[in-house]
Amino acid sequence: MSQRVSFYVNKYIEGDPTIKVGLQRGLITSRILTKHIIEEEREFKGSFDDVRNAVRKYTDEDVSSFSFKNIYNAFKDSHIDVRSNLASIEISRNDNTGNNLKIINEILSNNEKFVRVLNNENFFQVIMPEEDIDRITKLIKNQDIISPMKGVSCITIFLDSSVKYTPGIYFLIMGQISLNQINIYDVSSHESEFSVYIDEKDGAKVHQLLYELAEYQKKFCKNDR
């Protein structure tokens, strides 16, 4: 195995955190990763055996000592909530912002289904039930509305309180979603609650991914705290 192959493989793995997570969890074997690297990088000229040896060397030196035990403890007794039929709307920040916020407040202030508001220097974004978006778009000037979008789901996982003191938990969740090529519109967290906002068509898959993380904790971390 040449140093060039070893350098390339290390750089490839280090450049993709989700692959590192898969190796650390034992979900990706050296053979599978070797095939992936060779197929993904067709211009890379390395033999199968050389690439596999480099992957094994990386795993032995950089992965085996890392444990996800504490991270999985945060999934102890977790449960998942799904909210569908949501909509997202972005509204420009300009001279009409005060009036637009007043309109939104009047519609949503007494609505228990209200989700959340985000803002930056250019616009503010409201995520709300679909049933309210038509009322808002009728009352706010068209030129102030940037991108109304229906068909949003919010998947929330309620984690163990240890999440507040354990690094790497959200990285694990986001990595699993990324590996499945699911786009996330937004995320939010409060204490031990973590929510992702996604397209409704991906809701069932994200629910399954979070469920599998919780089941992994039940099966393999029973004696951990």
Image (cartoon, grey):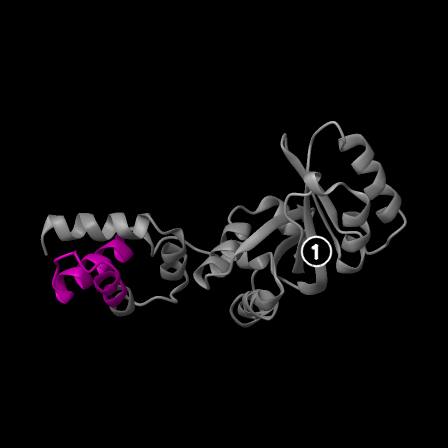
Crowding around mark 1 (Cα neighbors within 10 Å: few <14, some 14 to 19, many 20+) is many
Q: Nearer the viewer, residue 43 or 100?
A: 100
Query: Farthest residue toward the front?
Result: 142
**Residue 28's spot in the image, x, y percent?**
35, 66
Residue 214 shows in this picture: no
Query: Farthest residue toward the top?
Result: 95
| Mark 1: secondary structure | strand
Which residue is at 48% across, 60% downward?
Answer: 176
Assign the C terminus to one quadrant of the image: bottom right
Residue 109 lies in the magenta stretch:
no
Assign the N terminus to one quadrant of the image: bottom left
Q: In the displayed structure, does residue 211 sit left or right of residue 22?
A: right
Type of amino acid under label 1: Ala
Residue 59 lies in the magenta stretch:
yes
Q: Which residue is mark 1?
A: 87
Q: Which residues are magenta?
A: 34-61
Q: Nearer the viewer, residue 198 or 74?
A: 198
